[in-house]
Image (cartoon, rainbow, N blue to C red):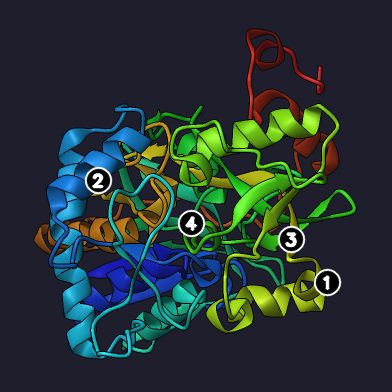
Amino acid sequence: MKKVIIIGAGLAGSYLATQLPQNYDITIITKASAQDSNSMLAQGGIAASLDPGDNPASHEADTLAAGQHRNKVAAVDQLVHEGPKLIQTLIKQGMPFDHQANGALDFGLEGAHSHHRILHAKGDRTGLALTTFVQSQIEHVHWQENTTAVELLVKNGTCYGVRVRHDPTGTFKTLTADAVVLATGGLGNLFPLTTNDATITGDGIAIAARAGAKMADMAFMQFHPTLLSLHGKCFGLISEAVRGAGAILVDENNTPIMAAVPKKDLAPRDVVARHLTWWRAAGHQTFLDISAIPDFPKRFPGITANLDRHHVPFRTTNRIPIQPGAHFMMGGVQADLAAQTSIKRLFAIGEVACNGVHGANRLASNSLLDCLVSAEEATKVIAALEPAVTPALPQDPTTIVPPKLPSLADLRQAAWHNLGVERTKHNSMTSTLG
């Protein structure tokens, strides 16, 4: 029986589990619960050229333009052609994407897209709906929740398993497998302002790097322009779909911030984030003006619930206070189009991986699509693997001496200063950590 270990319970890891044969011995490891992931928080939707007036070539052109043409064309081509097929299969299986009154799929528009091609589910709760639907199809899988992967077991360039820590007890255990799949997401919580789930701290990237896996495009971090900002802190994402529905960015004087920029409020995320950062550096406050969106609470129920939870008076002001924050890592563990890393039998899918599909700046709503496509491609190679012959491995430690590290607050401040929205030669070469 072939054994597969999946590290991460978001859409990429969960979808992979559904695509592997049922007679495989599959284990999913997650630091918290099956419900804790960036995928569950994704609001905007999933992009696919399924509308009759759209086509993969247009989606590919938009992806390349948003990525500053730093993308790998073969990876983008795979995404835009294979993605719609997988979504159509999910629809046939019963995935409840939102529809118009006439029964047709309801396609939204987001920044840097030339066509309405964004599918949503439950309004602005697409990630939650899609990931929950996929997880409901998982069978015959061993879940190990509240468990952290701390070390990949690699010998002679081949990964044979992973050492994990069961967090409630602090005990360590070695798990071996024929294939290990990283699906751990990015590293948003290394920054002080982020949209990411609290569990997303770069663990997968770190253990892969320590094991000798190649990394790629680590400088490419995407900052989402519109995080709910209150008293200098951020409390979740305000989806790009809100701007797609007609909201505009303004300052405290209601001056349109993006009026003179090509594509205005629907410019690529890096462009919008930089303009907001400049505006704030000049002493202005920044808001989303939602006055042009009728029935906002009905259209965006998840965002509305979050705004009400934090007592934002948007119903009377028609404004939501926002600022940019860390959102998505385009770089990560280097992987090929089949999700294979530089270490044999180690795969990387979703945000933790970098196969070049996103280039220097991910196009809005391509992330959930990439989760599906990269997971699907990985299953093909895993299915063809011969059973592994596991070598003698070191015994599990009873204790580990913690390394001397900077405080999380200092680390976050250094990341924001040196790796933030706008970088210069000076701040990229100077570290507040010494």
Which badge, 3 or 1, comes first in the chain's sequence? 1
Q: Are marks 4 and 3 in contact (CB under 8 Å)?
A: no
- Read off the residue under disc 4: 184
Which badge, 1 or 4, comes first in the chain's sequence? 4
Query: Which residue is found at the position 29% from the left and 48% from the top?
Result: 114
Whole-number angstrom distance, CA of label 3 to CA of label 2: 42 Å
Q: Quadrant of the C terminus?
A: top right
Q: Are marks 3 and 2 in contact (CB under 8 Å)?
A: no
Whole-number angstrom distance, CA of label 3 to CA of label 1: 8 Å
421 sits to left or right of 328: right
Judging depth in this view, the residue of 194 and 240 nearest the camera is: 240
Whole-number angstrom distance, CA of label 4 to CA of label 2: 15 Å
**Location of residue 279 (image quadrant):** top right
Indicate the secondary structure of the residue bearing disc 3: strand
Indicate the secondary structure of the residue bearing disc 4: loop
- Read off the residue under disc 3: 320
- Read off the residue under disc 1: 313
**Badge 4: residue crowd in 10 Å (few <14, some 14–19, many ≥20):** many
Residue 36: x and y in percent read 58, 72
Q: Is residue 74 above or below residue 136?
A: above
Q: Do the residues labelled 4 and 2 touch (CB within 8 Å)?
A: no
